[in-house]
Amino acid sequence: AQSVTQPDIHITVSEGASLELRCNYSYGATPYLFWYVQSPGQGLQLLLKYFSGDTLVQGIKGFEAEFKRSQSSFNLRKPSVHWSDAAEYFCAVGAGDSWGKLQFGAGTQVVVTP
Amino acid sequence: EPEVTQTPSHQVTQMGQEVILRCVPISNHLYFYWYRQILGQKVEFLVSFYNNEISEKSEIFDDQFSVERPDGSNFTLKIRSTKLEDSAMYFCASSSSPPRSYNEQFFGPGTRLTVL
């Protein structure tokens, strides 16, 4: 069965510092991978997605993610964090044989300090 | 920018009562979804809906749950007899393309359901 693991429940980062959020997946075929962000009181907003092709994916708000098949990972990165990046981040995988069912990781709460 | 809206933002109900959670998907979208997130747990898929039919449902989506598109704009989730364990944040989502094309699912802000 497919699964998504986000090992870090909570990360604190200083404004201007780099950020990397980890995501590992378990899935038999090539997965469809997503990163969503949820700010307080808001819905889930898509940051970026990977279906195929270039394994380095650029997203909105200056985020990027790299798909590494050998490590079953899809880590999210941002070179310089802004205070507005404080939010909860979810990695999700979509199964190729499913009608759009997304399976989410547990989420990583990011706190940005001055 | 078009967005998915959900009402109410917070619903408190007594155990055993029926609740209806409402969603207005983006207007030209054809594929609709419900997810839920119990506090401290993962976001879980409940059901997908297309062409007035359920396309897929999870094991969570038992006979107590139903979905409906009563008109051209609303998409509802009904829980017939709520249980304490139904307390969660419920998210509605919609997309314009078939799921196998993996176009983006747009999520609403959620309805927090509290069952007392």
Image (spheres, coloured by chain):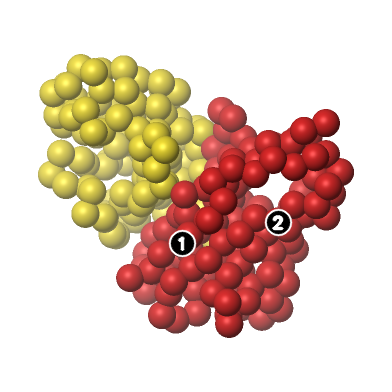
Chain colours: A red, B yellow
Residue type at the position of mark 1:
Val
Left or right: B93 with respect to A8?
left
Q: Nearer the viewer, residue B32 or A7?
A: A7
Instruction: Work out whether mark 2 precedes mark 1 in sequence or the reverse, and give the earlier one.
Output: 1
Q: Where residue B80 appears, x then y in whole percent?
A: 16, 31
Q: Mark 2: give few (<14), some (14-19) or many (20+) Cα within 10 Å.
A: some
Q: Quadrant of the N terminus of chain A?
A: bottom left
Q: Are marks 2 and 1 in contact (CB under 8 Å)?
A: no
Q: Compared to A30, does A106 lie above or below? A: above
Q: Would you identify the image quadrant in which residue A48 lies?
A: bottom right
At mark 1, the secondary structure is strand
Label number found at residue A4: 1
The residue at 54%/74% (across/down) is: A72
Tell me where residue B105 appears, x and y as whole percent.
51, 53
Q: Is residue B66 visible?
A: yes
Residues under labels 2 and 1: Cα distance? Answer: 17 Å
Specify the subunit that label 1 lies on. A
Taking the image as shown, residue A58 lies to the left or right of residue A108, namely: right
| Relative height, residue B11 to residue A98 (above, below) | above
Q: Quadrant of the image for the C terminus of chain A? A: top right
